[in-house]
Amino acid sequence: SKEDFNLAAIYVSDAQYNRNVYFDTLPQAVRLYMLYNHWALKVLLYFFMLVNLSLAIFEDPAVYPLPIWATMLVEILCLLIFTIRLIHYAKVILRDKFWKDPKNICIIVILTLTLVDMIIYGALKAANYYGVRWSRVLRPLLLVNVTEGRQLRRAFRSIRNALPQIFYVFLLFMFSILIFSLMALKLLGKRGLTNINGTPYFTSYLEIMFDLYVLVTTANSPDVMMPAYNANFFFAVFFIVYILINTYIFMSVFLAVVYNSYKKYLKEEVRQLVRAKRHKMVRAFGVLQEQREEGGEPVVTQASWNQLVRLVQPNLSNAHRELLWSVSDDKNQGAIGKVAFVQLADLLNIEIITIKSRPHPLQSLCPSLYQSAPSKLLCQLVQHRAFVMVYDLIILVNAVFIGLDEENPMIANSEWVFLALYILEILLKLYVFEPRVFFSKHSFWNCLSTSQIISTRFDTIIVISALIATIINSVMKSSSHFSSRQILDIVFILRVLRLIRVVDSIKRFRIIINTLIRIGPAILTFGQLIIVVYYIFAMVGMELFKGKVTFYEQSSTDPAKAYCGNPLLNGTDFAKLNYCKNNFNNVVSSFILLVELTVVNQWHDILYSGFATVTHISARIFFVLFHIIVVIVILNIFVAFVLEAFFVEY
Amino acid sequence: SKEDFNLAAIYVSDAQYNRNVYFDTLPQAVRLYMLYNHWALKVLLYFFMLVNLSLAIFEDPAVYPLPIWATMLVEILCLLIFTIRLIHYAKVILRDKFWKDPKNICIIVILTLTLVDMIIYGALKAANYYGVRWSRVLRPLLLVNVTEGRQLRRAFRSIRNALPQIFYVFLLFMFSILIFSLMALKLLGKRGLTNINGTPYFTSYLEIMFDLYVLVTTANSPDVMMPAYNANFFFAVFFIVYILINTYIFMSVFLAVVYNSYKKYLKEEVRQLVRAKRHKMVRAFGVLQEQREEGGEPVVTQASWNQLVRLVQPNLSNAHRELLWSVSDDKNQGAIGKVAFVQLADLLNIEIITIKSRPHPLQSLCPSLYQSAPSKLLCQLVQHRAFVMVYDLIILVNAVFIGLDEENPMIANSEWVFLALYILEILLKLYVFEPRVFFSKHSFWNCLSTSQIISTRFDTIIVISALIATIINSVMKSSSHFSSRQILDIVFILRVLRLIRVVDSIKRFRIIINTLIRIGPAILTFGQLIIVVYYIFAMVGMELFKGKVTFYEQSSTDPAKAYCGNPLLNGTDFAKLNYCKNNFNNVVSSFILLVELTVVNQWHDILYSGFATVTHISARIFFVLFHIIVVIVILNIFVAFVLEAFFVEY
Ligand code: NA
C-alpha cells in the first residue's frame, strides 16, 4: 500500500542521512515525520535560531539598541516556533521515547527557564529595578539540542570523551606549574629585582603562578624573563627548561591525548552509524518484502523497489535508477534479497557523474560554421595547455597591476583590459564546451577534481561580479564624480579574489586544496561549536565587564580617551596599546575580543592590565577558564581533526 | 680460530647496536675496528667535540675573552683528534668504501676549510686587518658527520624527506599571504589610518606582507588589527578570516604534512635497519658455521655460540647466557641453524629482570631480632599503602612550608624536621628491603615501572643532596653569619625537587611520566639537532649583529642605558621593553635570543624595532629564515615525534 511505501521510504531516507529518530510507524505519524524532515521547516527553524541568537545585538548592551518590548516580542515568537517544532516532534515519535530523550528535556527546560527569566526581567524593568537576562547563556544550547544538531552533538561528545584523559594531563601540568612557581619564588623572590615598571619582581606566589601560566601560552615571553635574565645569565636556563617542559612537551602531550581519544571515538561512532543504518534498511526491507515462492527467501521486486526509490529521491533520472537496480540485482532475477537491498542507502549517496557527449548547441544551429577549419582550430587552441598558461601569465601581470597605484589613469584603465580578457576567456570556453556542461555540477576539464569544479563556478561568478561592480563604480564616478567607498572595496576584493585561480593550475596545490575543501563541512560543525562556547562566554563577559571600558572615536578630543574612559586604566598597557575597543560593551566586540583571546597573544595585557584593573583580580578566572576550554581543549580537537582528515585524504 | 670469533663478535655487536660500517675483514682491521668502537675513544671524541663547540665562548665576541693563540691552539688540538679518529676509521674500512661515503668527505672538507680559515684569520689578525672566522659555522656539522652521529643523521634525513611536501604547502601559504596583503593594501592603505606611533598604517606592500607573516605567528595580535578595527568593526572580519586560514588551518596542515612524511619515513628506516641487522647476523653465522653431517644444514655449536656471546657481552651472567641458549636451541640439539642464530642480536638486547628473593643482610646477621614480632610489624607497616599516603601528606605539608617565608625561625627549623622524616623513610626502606634491590637497577615496589625505578634513585639522591647542602649552609651560616647565595639556591631547588615524588603515587600520572621518560633519549637527539641549527645561526648572527646593542648593568647610570648604547634605538619598543640583553654579543646571549625567537612571542619587536633598526631592514631575512627552519620545520617534526611516541606507548 501507499502507506507501506511511505514508511519504507522514510526508513531509507533516515539511513541515507544518518538520522536516528525512533518515529511512530502509524501512517499519520509517518506523514507527520515526512513533513518534519521537510527542508523548508529546517530552514525556518535555523532562521529563527539565528534570529534568537542575534537578539543579543539589540538587547542591552546593544550594538543597535531596541526597546525591551520589541526584542521580547521577537524572542517570544522564536520560543513559539521552537515549541511548535518540539510539539511536532512529540507527535512524530513514541511518547516514552520522547520523555526518555535528554535533548527534548533540555529544550523544554531551556524554553521554560527563558520564559521565566523574561517575565522576571520584564517585571524588574517595569518597576525600574536592575535585572540580568541570565537565560541568554542558554540560547546557543538550543543549537546543540535540536534534532538537526547531530554533528554538533557528536563534536561535544568527542570532547566529553577526551575529558578524562585531558584531566589527568592537566593535573600533572598544573603540578608542574606549581613546582616551578615555588622554585621561582625561592630563587628570584628575595633578590630585590624589579619589573620594568618598578614593581617588585616574582615576590607573590599567586602572581608567579599566573605569570608562568601565561608563559605557557608564550604571551609574556621574553618580558617575564627579562628582569631575572638581566640580573644573571643562569636564570634564563630556568625559564628555558620551563618552556621546554610546559610549552613544548605538555602542549604536545595535550594534543596527543586529545588526538588519541578523538581517533578511538571516531572509530566507535562510525561503527555505530553503520549498525544503525543497517538496522533501518532491514526495517525498510521488512515492510516491502514478499515471498515469490513457497518457503523461499523474502525479496523485494523491481516494481516495489522502483516505487520506493522514486519516493526517496524523486529527482533521480530513470537512467540513474536503472543503473542502481542493475548494480543491486546483479544476477538479473527481477527481485533482490535482504543483503542487496540493505546497500541501497549507500548507493543513493554515491554521486554518479554522467558525462554525455552532447553536441554543442552551435553545432545544431549552424553546423557548417562550427565545423569549419578556423572554428576547429579555435577549439583546439582553447583546449591546449598553453591557453591555461597564457591566462596564468595574464593573472600574474594583473597581480602586479593591482599592487600599483590605482590613481594612475593608465593603471585604472588597464582594469578594463583585464576584465575584457577574463570575459573573453569565459566566452571562448562557452564556445568550445557545451554550456550545460560548463555550468553543470561537473567541470569541463579532463581532470574532474572537486577543487576544479568549484573553482570554475567560482571564477565565473567572481569575474561577472567584478564586471558588474566595476561598471557600477564607473557609472557612479562619471555621473556624480563621486565613487562609493563600499563599492570600491567590493571591486578591490573581487579583483584580488580573481587571482586565486592561478593556484588551480598546479596539480600539487590542487591536492592540498581538495583536502581543505573536503574538510570544509566539518569545519562548519566546529564553527557552530565555537559559536556556542563564544556566545556563552560573551553573555557572561558582558554582564561582568560591560561599560567598564569605553572606546572613543579617532576624532574625539575627550581627555578620557587616553585611559579608555576609566581613570583606573591611566598608564596601564591596555590604555597605552590603545586597546579600548577590545571590550565587552556589546556582543560583536565581545566576540572579537574572544577571538583575540583564542589567538592568545597579548591576552594577559587585555585581561590583566585591562579587565582585572577595572574590576577585580579574580577576573583572571574568567580568562584562564576561557583559555583552558577553548585553546587547550577545543583548538586541540580542531587540530586533531585536521590532522586526521589530512591523513585520510592526502 | 680466535680471529673468526672476533669477526663474528663484531658482526653481532654491530647488529646489536645498529652500526652500519663496512669494515675490512682482515684480522688486523677487525682488531682496529674493535678498538674504534671502544667507549673510551667515543667519549674522548665527544669531549673534544664539546671543547671545539665551546671555543665560541672564548673567541671574539667572547663571554670570557682569551687570546687568539690560546683558542687556536685548542682548536688545532681538536682538529688533530678528529683527524686521528678519521685516519683510524680509514684503516678500519675498505679504501673504496671510505671514499664513497659522503660523511667522510664532509669531515675532510670541514677540517681542511677550518685549517685554511684559521691560517687566513691568523695572518689577517697578525697584520691587524679585519677578519671573520667563517669556518665556525662548520663546527656543529662534525657532530652530524662522525660515525656515532647515526641518530642525528636520521633526524636530518627525516627532515630532508619532509621538505618537498612542506615546500608545496609553504608555497601555497606564501601565496595566501600575498593575496591577503594585496587585499589589505587595497582595503586599508588609502584610508589614512595611522599606527599607534603615528606612522601611516598598511601603506607599503612589503610592510604589510611582513606584518601579516608575523600575524601568522600571532606575535603582533591584536596590535596589527587595532587601527583598522578602531576605524570600523568590519575590518576585524578580514583579520579573523586571515588568522583562521593562515594560523589555524595552514599551521595544522604543516604539522599534518610533516607528521605524515615522518611516519612513512620511520617505517622505511625501521625496515632497512631490520634488513641490515639480519644481513650482519647471517655473515656472523657464515664465519662460525660448521656442518655436523654430510649434506646437512650448516649449524653453530653450543661451544662456539658460548665463546661468541662471551666475547660480545663479557659481563653477561652464566645463567642469563644459558637462558638465551635454551631459547635459541628450543629442540635441545646442541647446535642451532641460521634462523635461530639470527635472533641473537635481538635476544641480547632484551633486558631480563632477575628478581632474586635474597634474604635481608640483617636477617643473616641477627635473625632473632629481624624475625621478632615488632620488626615484622614494622616491615608490614612500611610496605602498607598507608605508609606511602602518610609520606605524600608530609610532602604536601612540606610544600606549604616551602611557600611560606623562610625568614621566620619556626619555618627555617621545620626544614630539619622534614629532612629527618625523609631520611627516616630511606632508612626504613633500607631496613625492610634488601639494599642491593633498593639501589639496583630495579625498584623494590611490586610494580616495576620505569618511572618508579628512576624516581626511587632520584628521591634518594635528592634527599641526600638536600641533607648535605642544608648542613653546609647551616655550618657556613653559624660559622661566619653569612650564607652563600649559590648554596642557598641549591638548597631551595633540591627542597622543591623533593616534592616531585608525590606524582609517583598516582598511577595515571605514572603512565604519562613513563612515556615521557621513554621518549627522553630521542629528545636528546632533537637537542643535538637544535644545537646544530642554533650554533650555525648564532655564528652568523654574531658576525652580523655583534656590538650593535649593549647591555648596561642595573646599577649603571650611563644615559646610553635607556637606548641600549645605540642612539638609533632611542624610543623604540626594543629599548622601552628593556630588551638590551637580547643581543648577539656573545654565544650564550645569542643562544638565549634564539630560544626567544623559537618561542616566537615578541620576535617582531626584537628583530624589527631592534636589529633591523640598528642595521638594515633586510635583517628581517635572517629572522624569518630562522622562523621557517626552526618553528615551521623542526618544531613540527618534534611535535610529530612526541605524538607518534604517545600513540605507541600510551
Ligand atoms: Na604569542
Image: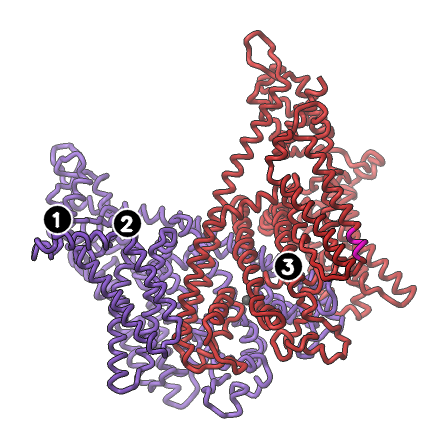
Chain colours: A purple, B red
**Compared to A482, does A381 lie above or below?**
above
Q: Which residue is mark 3?
A: B540
* Residue type, mark 1 in image: Asn
Q: Quadrant of ligand 1?
A: bottom right
Report if the beta carbon of the residue with label 2 is closer than 8 angstroms to ligand 1.
no
Residue B40, given in percent of the width and then of the height, sits at: 76, 38
- At 73% across and 68% down in the image, what residue appears? A188
- The chain to which mark 1 is attached is A
**Compared to B130, does A325 lie above or below?**
above
Q: Which residue is mark 1?
A: A318
Residue A6, given in percent of the width and then of the height, sits at: 15, 53
Is A419 left, or right, of B64 in this rendering? left
For the view shown, which residue lies furthest in the front direction? B127
Q: Is residue A243 magenta?
A: no
Q: Is residue B71 magenta?
A: yes
Residue A191, given in percent of the width and then of the height, sits at: 76, 71
The magenta segment: B68-72
Q: Which residue is mark 2?
A: A447
Would you call the spot at circle 1 few (<14 residues within 10 Å), some (14-19), or many (20 or more)?
A: few
Asked if one can make out residue A132 in the rendered structure from this viewpoint, the answer is: no
